[in-house]
Image (tube, grey):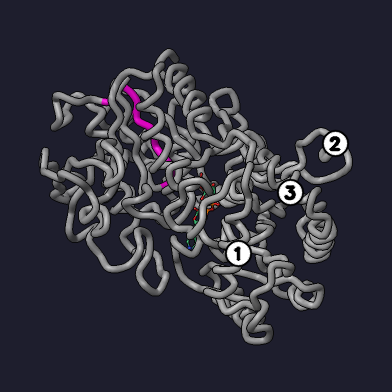
Amino acid sequence: MNILFVTSEAFPLIKTGGLADVSGALPKVVRTLPQYSGSIRLLIPGYNPVLAKLKNAHEIAKVTVLGQQCSLVLGTMPDSDLAVIAVQNTFLYERNGGPYNDAQGHDWLDNPLRFAILSRVASILASTNSPLPDWKPDLVHCNDWQTGLTPAYMKLVDHSPAKSILSIHNLAFQGNCHPGWLHTLGLPEESFQINGLEYYGQISFLKAGVFYADKLSTVSPTYAKEIQTEAFGFGMQGLLKSRADDLIGILNGIDANEWSPEKDIHISKHFSKSNLAGKKVIKANLQEHLGLHIDANAPILGVVSRLTYQKGLDLLPSIMPELVQAGCQFAILGSGEKGLESAFNDMAQRFPSRVSVTNGYHEHLSHNIMAGTDMFIMPSRFEPCGLNQLYGLAYGTPPIVTRTGGLADSVCDTNELSLKHHTATGFVLENVSEMSLLVTIQRALSVWKDQPTWKKIQINGMKQDLSWETRAISYLSLYNNTLEQ
Ligand code: ADP
Ligand code: GLC
């Protein structure tokens, strides 16, 4: 079974969020499963960092796609021998800025073309006209809206014999554009209808994938159910419900080579569930590094996040003064909505030895916040899976979360019963409100004062099987089911 895994980001080549973590780990782990035979290749746009980091890169073909000359560059990941094909086109992908937007955060205006080309290349590689006759995928695994047109091209344009799966990592990002793009994107007129890729008068890349893919998956069982409802379906709940038999939720895992307190290359001391001593050292180093008052008895609450409506962190600034008063410290890393950035920065100015705020993207600091803080805050309004709460569990940093999506599937609230059954791993809000966040953090703080009980919660979390190996087996059976369909 040959698999083409199509994605717009993959760690360590390029990362803006959890999709990169998944794309960097899942294909790598599937190919090592004893039950799997075949070869996997990852397909990604040739952004500057991708071209710079690929190992043994060499051109294997040239293709003209939607009027653009692209070169297909084959190489391997910098940290494994997973094969990667980068779609190279200087004009489309080699820009200063992010994969989706410019340095000011504005979406690239030609995103429809940039990601249609990625999608069309995937479809061509899975067709009988592929320029790579010696390697053909039996299955194309697409991820999020950026690859959503792939199943449409496979069915309607290239008449591909291969099967397709679309994994939805976040239904909020849909890749919608004006119908005037239809011709430029090489999409047949008849696809622009309700039983096709039309979505409220626009072309929707994500809807195309949801409609045309043979199978659908999303990144947690709870989110798979939520997206079939009006509250979480972003208008696609009806279509998703009609495809319920083809939709499965598989919880994400952790890449243990990157995110393990026993071998993390970013932290100054390693630790484990049988010896947590190193965590205290990292905490003291973190306090020093961030200019926080060095105090082992002050609980530090960590945040590493995109600062957007989804993440619910707008609930935090107004309750921070009360928590600082109660002795808490904050280590916040994130960027996004400017209003929220400045609300956090105001807190840091007001309480310089208690609140640290870092804007921007910092891989090294994110690992040290995960490892060196005492609790992790993630009050998301919706969360398809969420990886940071999984990292919190692995690093003995109990997460404080809302009961939604993957948060509901991975964190067990602390109460008498869950403590007795050794299942307590964190703290779950009753609802998404400032009051609920405050009360839940206060509840966590009162347990924190009882260190032997706190340690039990940490160890319960650290004992969870969060590995990709288990999840990869579920993906493999999804792959098998899709091929048998
Ligand atoms: P999402 O993909 O919705 O942003 P996830 O929890 O699935 O949320 O994944 C977020 C990933 O991005 C995690 O690996 C997290 O550590 C990382 N991350 C988010 N913001 C930052 C930041 N400012 N600096 C470094 N890493 C970040
Ligand atoms: C998205 C979601 C996040 C999920 C990640 C990886 O970015 O917002 O919840 O963990 O994709 O699947």
- Point 37% across, 26% down: residue: 32
Is residue 38 visible in the rendered image? The answer is: yes
- Point 71% across, 69% down: residue: 316
For the N terminus, the quadrant is top left
User: Which is nearer the N-term, disc 2 or disc 1?
Assistant: 1
Q: Reply above or below: 243 against 202.
A: above
Q: Which amino acid does label 2 sit on?
A: Lys
Which residue in the protein does label 2 denote?
420
Q: Does the magenta stretch include residue 434?
A: no
Q: In this view, does 234 lie to the left or right of 448?
A: left
- Residue 311, picture quadrant: bottom right
Which residue is at the far bottom? Answer: 350
Q: Considering depth in this image, is 68 or 223 the residue closer to the camera? A: 223
Is label 2 in a helix, a strand or a loop? helix
Q: In this view, does 396 lie to the left or right of 119?
A: right
Label for residue 283? 1
- Point 48% across, 50% down: residue: 18
Q: What residue type is labelled 1?
A: Lys
Q: What residue type is labelled 3?
A: Lys
User: Which is nearer the N-term, disc 2 or disc 3?
Assistant: 2
Which residue in the protein does label 3 denote?
455
The region drawn magenta spans 137-145
